[in-house]
Amino acid sequence: MDQSPTVWRDAQPLVDSATPMIDPFGRAVTYLRVSVTDRCDFRCTYCMSENMTFLPKKDLLTLEELDRLCSAFIAKGVRKLRLTGGEPLVRKNIMHLVRGLSRHIGSGLDELTLTTNGSQLARHAQELADCGVRRINVSIDTLDPDKFKAITRWGELDKVMEGVRAAQAAGIHVKLNAVALKEFNEHEIPELMRFAHGEGMDLTLIETMPMGETGEDRTDQYLPLSLVRQRLEEQFTLDDIPYRTGGPARYVEVRETGGRLGFITPLTHNFCESCNRVRLTCTGTLYMCLGQDDAADLRTALRASDDDAYLSAAIDEAISRKPKGHDFIIDRNHRKPAVARHMSVTGG
Ligand code: SAM
Ligand code: SF4
């Protein structure tokens, strides 16, 4: 059962921070993404099948355990922490975790943020802002309510828009994420961009990644962002800019709108060289690379001892196995996902 944490540890680093996490390729790990649940109230066609089997609730780390793990990473040099999922805001009592983690902001942690589908954002926006969340990502692939329903299977665009407005009203900077999908939204991208920029939001486009069975054919959905960019350049002037948010997106500034547009291109451009992140699942499994199956079981280390030195050693061992890069390829013959787990397990 999901438990609310009752005892939070104080803000002091739990583990000796004298050993920052440096992987075998010299990359410092400073960014932790945490999938707090594999469940979701949407079933986006590129992400999940309609009849997903989710983890039994008893397999999930409690919120207190998640806090302890995140705090151990912060003590070891993580400066940016993103809660994701599944849908992070459907995890019961998630705001207890957010409030608890917010104690690290300014004492180790530079940024606490989340990626959400926005369905539950309206009711949580003010509390998120009160907890020091300054920026969030909201996923919107289309501005057409019928198409939105079709791509998410279960989502309501109105509710998401209400969430976006509530977040903005609470002073949170919203960035929109859109997965670029062949024939679905490829001709709507200029409109999506004008809308985002008109509302003071950045827009980031994501290429579909071949993760998990979805009941859809990935090769039918895949739209290379190089083509999207080429088409946008027929209408807009895109200036490359060095702006970074600690993630893999490469940004341009669009002269006509004055806004920023990001491109995340795992398949057409290798973003591994500067990878600074690892991903934790809601069961305490640490994936050192989004595009590889190798993982470390931190739940066992967490539960084996109250001594955080034990956990710290398990984290160090995992980081020593961080691979150089991913192996995503679209398999045109077998049409199988390159990575068997769904994006909702590791949170993107
Ligand atoms: N539920 C939240 C949301 O949708 O924003 C957070 C989790 S979701 C897995 C994180 C991001 O991954 C979303 O922007 C989503 O569009 C993207 N995503 C999901 N499956 C993907 C896939 N197969 N390829 C590329 N992006 C994907
Ligand atoms: Fe849910 Fe996000 Fe996956 Fe859509 S992309 S099904 S909202 S986890």
Image (cartoon, rainbow, N blue to C red):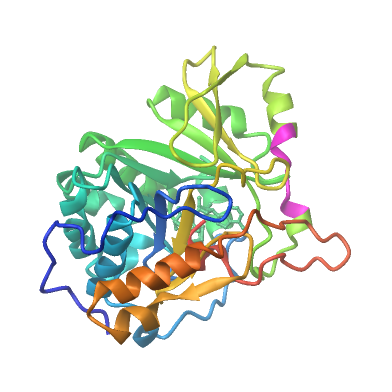
**On screen, residue 280 above or below 256:** below
Name the residue rendered at 31%, 86% in the picture: 304
- Residue drawn at the location 47% of the way across and 31% of the way down: 244
Tell me: residue 268, above or below residue 203. Answer: below
- Residue 199 picture quarter: top left
Where is residue 66? Give x, y as percent: 29, 69
- Which quarter shows the N terminus? bottom left
Residue shown at 53%/32% (left/top)? 192
Considering depth in this image, is 283 or 13 the residue closer to the camera?
A: 13
Relative to residue 68, is residue 171 depicted above or below?
A: above
Q: Position of residue 135 (x, y in %)?
A: 32, 39
Q: Is residue 239 left or right of residue 4?
A: right
Quadrant assignment, res 196: top left
Quarter-of-image position of residue 176: top left
Q: Position of residue 40 (x, y in %)?
A: 43, 67
Residue 92 at least partly seen: yes
Evaluate whether residue 42 shows in this view: no
Stretch in magenta: 220-226
